[in-house]
Image: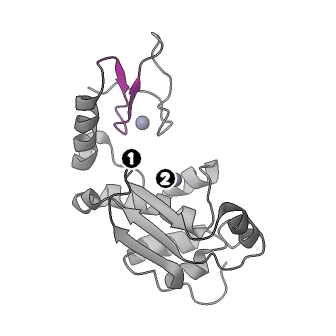
């Protein structure tokens, strides 16, 4: 449980997503959450490198780790969301939940991070997401033919082996060929 007021979401964060985040987290795993209302800026800008979202801290990782441990404020944080996400609310919420968890102090992609993202806002399937389909199309046009494509999240990667992969390296779900 957090002390003090965590009722108000940071600007741009949907209140429902924020409430679920507050319910699922606690100061031990996510000490920065109470600071986000004041310290977080959310903007719709292309984070580049084919990414949908990015969380930027102003302080470096060592200092961040120290402040995590002592539950001190994390300084200014910016979350960049790709402008295409305005066309796909499910994918927007999924990406935002992913980045918000980083901002609360879960800075690595560990199992806690992926479990809570899945509980808060699971990724839409490829067939339900125009934005994922568009991204996949762009990837397809730029890649050689020998490519695996995950039927779940649309991630594409080079075939280095003949055997079918068991899991997608991006979303970690059992591999199903895109149809
Ligand atoms: Zn991440
Ligand atoms: Zn996948």
State whether residue 136 appears in this view: yes
Give above or below for 64 relative to 135.
Answer: below
Give the answer, above or below, for where 34 lies relative to 93. Answer: below
| Residue at which label 1 appears | 49
Q: Quadrant of the N terminus?
A: bottom right
Q: Secondary structure at mark 1?
A: loop
Secondary structure under the numbered disc 2 in the rendered image = helix
Q: Nearer the viewer, mark 1 or mark 2?
A: 1
Q: Is residue 103 magenta?
A: no
Left or right, residue 36 beside residue 65: left
Q: CA distance from mark 1 to mark 2?
A: 24 Å
Quarter of the image with the C terminus is top left
Q: Is residue 71 left or right of residue 119?
A: right
- Name the residue rendered at 58%, 89% in the picture: 5
In the image, is 32 to the left or to the right of 121? right
- The spot of residue 131 in percent (x, y) is 25, 49
The quadrant in which residue 60 appears is bottom right
Residue 153 painted magenta: yes
Residue sitting at 41 percent across and 23 percent down?
158
Q: What range is drawn magenta here? A: 145-158
Question: Which residue is tagged 2?
Answer: 118
């Amino acid at each position: 449980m957090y002390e003090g007021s965590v009722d108000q979401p940071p600007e741009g964060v949907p209140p429902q997503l924020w409430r679920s985040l507050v319910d699922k987290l606690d100061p031990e795993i996510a000490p920065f959450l109470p600071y986000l209302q004041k310290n977080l800026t959310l903007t719709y800008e292309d984070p580049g490198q084919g990414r949908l979202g990015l969380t930027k801290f102003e302080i470096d990782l060592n200092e961040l780790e120290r402040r995590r441990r002592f539950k001190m404020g994390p300084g200014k944080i910016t979350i960049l969301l790709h402008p295409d996400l305005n066309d796909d609310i499910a994918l927007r919420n999924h990406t935002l939940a992913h980045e918000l968890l980083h901002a609360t102090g879960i800075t690595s992609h560990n199992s806690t991070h992926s479990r809570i993202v899945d509980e808060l806002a699971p990724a839409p399937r490829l067939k339900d997401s125009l934005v994922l389909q568009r991204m996949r199309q762009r990837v397809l046009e730029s890649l050689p033919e020998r490519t695996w494509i995950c039927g779940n999240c649309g991630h594409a990667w080079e075939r280095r082996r003949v055997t079918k992969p068991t899991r997608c390296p991006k979303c970690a779900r059992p591999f199903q060929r895109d149809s």
